[in-house]
Amino acid sequence: MRVLGIDPGFERLGIAIIEEDASGVALIYSHCFKTAADLPFNERLMAVGDEVARIIEKYHPEALAIETLFFNTNQKTAMMVSESRGVVLYRATRAGLTVYEYTPPQIKIAVAGYGKADKKQVAFMTKKLVAVGDEITSDDEIDAIATGLTCLASYKTIT
């Protein structure tokens, strides 16, 4: 199964393509896509949508695994991230991908075994579960990979 893992955002979007077959799990692609801060918000959303569409077209994933929104103290940012999430969900659904959504604790449990794991623990275990190069240091990119891994682990239990 090939999964598009997304850590949603409008400034930075974590993107990963993870694949599992008989030989195991492999990271096919990952990137932290960034939009220009000087662009109007609607153009940043369009850039996010265009990038997701490009990745879907290039890698042909079967499913989208996306993190649900975690509300922090900044409601304006949370609303903007939710709008970016909507663009990603639209592009994935339009392309016929099956959509799986996971909460941050679900991702932490699947990857680190503990629902309150911190970023370092998630990054450490993500790199143990799939070959991730040392050049990948962005939290957004690691979170996208972890979200994809969560989907693969969860998919086994529901099929």
Image (spheres, helix red, strand yellow):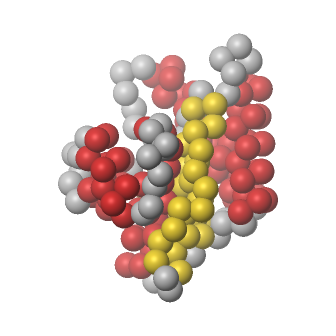
Q: Quadrant of the N terminus?
A: bottom right
Residue 85: image location, x then y, percent: 59, 42
Whether residue 74 sits left or right of residue 13 in the image: it is left
Residue 64 visible in the shown view: no
Residue appearing at x 57%, y 32% in the figure: 12
Residue 90: image location, x then y, percent: 70, 50
| View extreme (front): residue | 134
Residue 55: image location, x then y, percent: 72, 53
Q: Nearer the viewer, residue 124 or 60?
A: 124
Residue appearing at x 51%, y 68% in the figure: 26
Residue 77 visible in the shown view: yes
Residue appearing at x 23%, y 59% in the figure: 113
Question: Up-down: is 157 above or below 101?
Answer: below
Question: Up-down: is 60 above or below 137?
Answer: below
Q: How many marks?
A: 0
Question: Up-down: is 104 above or below 159?
Answer: above
Residue appearing at x 49%, y 82% in the figure: 23
| View extreme (bottom): residue | 22
Question: Up-down: is 8 above or below 92?
Answer: above
Which quadrant would residue 118 be assigned to in this image?
A: top left
